[in-house]
Every structure is written in C-alpha cells, then in structure tokens.
Image: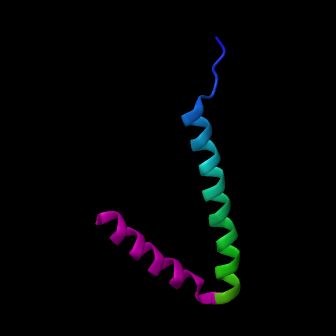
Amino acid sequence: MTERLGFTETVSFALGGIIGGGIFAVLGVVAQVAGPTAWIAYLVTGIVVMATGYS
C-alpha cells in the first residue's frame, strides 16, 4: 500500500521546516548580540512563552 501526503500533512511539514529553520537562524543572531549571556535571553524568552501559553 502506498501512502501519500495530503494537504494538511504537506502544510504541517512545510511550516515545521520554516519555523525550525527560523529558530536556528535566530540562535546565531542572539549569540552574536548577547555573547556569553545568550542563555539569559533564552531564559527570559522561555518565561514569556510559558506565560503566553498559560494565558
């Protein structure tokens, strides 16, 4: 049996690639700007994301 990707699967796959690639691209920019304190930037971002998800 041959399985095929439908519209939903294809869109999900494309969005996942775009979002994932964006995360790695931003990681380099944050590391360049924040330097060794980049982990603080991600900690603060994580707190904001959790608060947004909770709301």
The quadrant holding residue 32 is: bottom right
For the view shown, which residue lies furthest in the left direction? 55
Tell me: residue 36, above or below residue 29.
below
Compared across the picture, whether 8 is left or right of 18 comes to left
Compared across the picture, whether 43 is left or right of 54 comes to right
Residue 27, position as x, y percentages in the image = 65, 73
Front position in the image: 13 or 45: 13
Q: Main secondary structure of the magenta part?
A: helix
Residue 5, position as x, y percentages in the image = 62, 28
- Residue at 67% in and 88% down: 33
Compared across the picture, whether 12 is left or right of 32 comes to left
> In the image, which residues are magenta?
34-55
Specify whether residue 2 is painted magenta: no
Specify whether residue 46 is painted magenta: yes
Residue 10, position as x, y percentages in the image = 62, 37
- Residue at 68% in and 60% down: 21
**Quadrant of the image for the C terminus?**
bottom left
For the view shown, which residue lies furthest in the top direction? 1
- Residue at 35% in and 63% down: 53
Front position in the image: 8 or 31: 8
Front position in the image: 7 or 9: 7
**Quadrant of the image for the N terminus?**
top right
